[in-house]
Amino acid sequence: MNPSCSASFRHLGDGRLFQLQNDAPAAASRAIEYFWLCDRCSAAMTLRIARDGNVVTTGLPETQNEGRNALDAENRRVLRAVTFLRTTHPMGT
């Protein structure tokens, strides 16, 4: 999601995954989109829904209401972080 980052998404345990859900009744289906920030980027930034409805990066110090979902009430869309438990593989890999 960060255009200046060249990291590749490899698995869910690295970085931070975000889910954008469209709950608009006019939508043919409840569209879900996913966005990802690598570990390095997610340590300094997060995602939010801009006024034009696009998902954009924003620095953590600029973020208000830390830990809450981003809401685009006009278009009935919610952006939330998806959390996975980090576990170690039984074989230690």
Image (cartoon, rainbow, N blue to C red):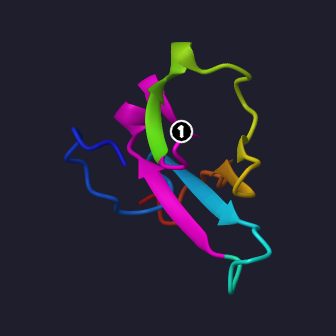
Q: Position of residue 38 (x, y in %)?
A: 38, 44
At a point 48% along the width and 49% down the height, the residue shown is 54
At a point 27% along the width and 56% down the height, the residue shown is 8
Residue lying farthest to the bottom in this orientation: 28
Q: Is residue 17 left or right of residue 6?
A: right
The answer to which of 88 and 47 lies nearer the viewer is: 47
Is residue 79 a member of the stretch shown in magenta?
no
Q: Locate the C terminus by quadrant.
A: bottom left
At a point 43% along the width and 23% down the height, the residue shown is 44
The answer to which of 80 and 10 lies nearer the viewer is: 80
Task: Give the residue type at disc 1.
Answer: Ala
Answer few, some or many: residues within 10 Å of disc 1's Cα (few below 14, many 20 plus, some between 14 and 19).
Answer: some
The span shown in magenta is 31-54
Residue marked by disc 1? 50
Q: Position of residue 82 (x, y in %)?
A: 65, 53
Q: Quadrant of residue 40?
A: top left
Looking at the rendered structure, the secondary structure element under dot 1 is loop
